[in-house]
Image (cartoon, rainbow, N blue to C red):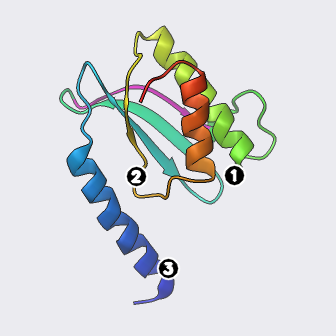
């Protein structure tokens, strides 16, 4: 198995473990994060209904994004998502980091979402 494939397998194992403990309910939906090399994506999901309640990504062209793969873009996505969630009446979420380490872009997105009014 090559090095990159090994990284993906390990992240998938971590993701499954996190997903077992973190489920989205109507009262406390799940904030799921995915990052690629170029972009970062976040969505708030009600797992019982199988619905995405709101989402944001660096591809949408949120305000203040000049580069899409850095911490500034992640913070802008977090603010945008928090604004959409508060408008939809969502105040508390369960954070699902998707198997990624909680630092860098993932942490920047989470901190910005907290500043925007989400609790987790």
Instruction: Say which residue appears at 76% left-offset and 37% top-offset.
Output: 65
Q: How far apart are marks 1 and 2 (CA)?
A: 17 Å
Horizontally, is 84 left or right of 49 in the view?
Answer: right
- Give the mark nearer the N terminus: 1 vs 3: 3
Instruction: Say which residue appears at 26% left-offset and 58% top-offset.
Output: 16
Q: Mark 3 points at which residue?
A: 4
Q: Name the residue under label 1.
A: 69
Q: How far apart are marks 2 and 3 (CA)?
A: 17 Å
Q: What stretch is highlighted in magenta?
A: 50-57
Q: In this view, does 54 lie above or below 74?
A: above
Q: Main secondary structure of the magenta part?
A: strand
- Foreground tag (1 vs 2): 2
Instruction: Say which residue appears at 49% left-offset and 9% top-offset.
Output: 87
Secondary structure type for disc 3: helix
Q: Which quarter of the image is occupied by the N terminus?
A: bottom left
Q: Is residue 94 above or below residue 118?
A: below
User: Could you say where residue 39 lies in the image, as x and y percent from the top left?
Assistant: 62, 49
- Give the mark nearer the N terminus: 1 vs 2: 1
Query: Quadrant of residue 45 in the image?
Result: top left
Instruction: Say which residue appears at 40% left-offset and 58% top-offset.
Output: 99
Would you say the residues marked 1 and 2 are in contact, meaning their CB atoms lie under 8 Å apart? no
Q: Does the magenta stretch include residue 56?
A: yes
């Amino acid at each position: 198995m090559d090095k990159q494939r090994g990284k993906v397998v390990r992240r998938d194992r971590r993701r499954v473990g996190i997903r077992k403990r973190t489920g989205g309910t109507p009262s406390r939906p799940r904030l799921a994060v995915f990052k690629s090399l170029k972009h970062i994506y976040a969505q708030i999901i009600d797992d019982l209904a199988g619905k995405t309640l709101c989402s944001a990504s660096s591809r949408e062209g949120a305000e203040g994004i000049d580069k899409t793969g850095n911490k500034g873009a992640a913070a802008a996505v977090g603010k945008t998502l928090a604004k959409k969630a508060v408008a939809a009446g969502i105040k508390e979420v369960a954070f699902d980091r998707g198997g990624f380490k909680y630092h860098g872009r993932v942490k920047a997105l989470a901190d910005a979402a907290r500043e925007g009014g989400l609790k987790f």
